[in-house]
Image (cartoon, rainbow, N blue to C red):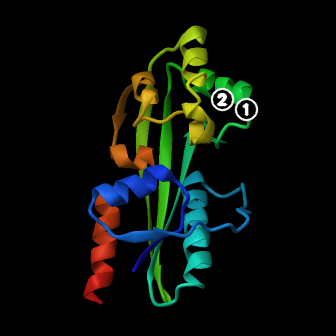
Amino acid sequence: MLILASSSPRRAKLLKDAGLNFIVEPSNQDEVIDLKMKPQDIALELAKMKAIHVAAKYPNDVVLGADTIVVFEEEILGKPKDEDDAYRMLKKLSGDRHVVYTGVAVVKGDTVKSFVSATEVSMKKLSDLEIWNYIKTGEPMDKAGAYGIQGDGGSLVDHYKGDFFTIVGLPLKDVLDVLKSFEKE
């Protein structure tokens, strides 16, 4: 059985749309990390922590953990604390480029396979009115960097270089390749 160690409805939808059967078992482990690490290493470490924590309860199953972070000029932009924080993040991202990293870890027993996917995103120059109208949709509040490219936030993005699904939070092609590798073992 595949276990998704995440409460993200976006990750669950991607797996469901890919035709996979799985159950959701979010990791409630505290996400304590060394902020001196490189952002991509942080995303990878958090993904591993989630997957390993849940795998302890499911030693015979395949557990998938993931973590997505948005990085602008070396600052990690997590989920906004409130609307003002969402505004601060979106104002920073406006008219500029940032990188989205999604770390993925797949665990079965003692085997851990992990990787990081990175995508560069360029945002349109946004007016204060555009930012506040987007914030009022409520969409930014549970998303790293305060936007969701797969929803209304897609209209804020000018273009991106890399995997769209990395930005959504689960680089699906690469995840499916890793899951297939477990089937062969």
- Where residue 52 sits, quadrant-wise, is bottom right
> Relative to 2, is 137 on the left or the right?
right
Q: Residues within 10 Å of mark 1 (few under 14, many from 20)?
A: few
Q: Is residue 7 left or right of residue 177?
A: right
Does residue 120 sit above or below 86 in this rendering? below
Q: Going 54% across and 73% down the picture, which residue do you hit?
A: 51
Q: Based on the displayed image, in which of its 4 quarters is residue 178 positioned?
A: bottom left
Q: Amino acid at mark 1?
A: Asp
Q: Residue at 33% of width from left, 74% of height from top?
A: 179
Quarter of the N terminus within the rendering: bottom left
Q: Nearer the viewer, residue 126 or 7?
A: 7
Residue 81 appearing in the image: yes
Mark 1 element type = loop
State yes or no: discs 2 and 1 in contact (Cβ < 8 Å): yes
Taking the image as drawn, is residue 72 in sight?
no
Quadrant where the C terminus sits is bottom left
Question: Disc 1 marks which residue?
Answer: 82
Q: Is residue 62 above or below residue 145?
A: below
Give the residue number, with chain letter if any, for mark 2.
86
Residue 46, horizontal then vertical, whole percent: 60, 63
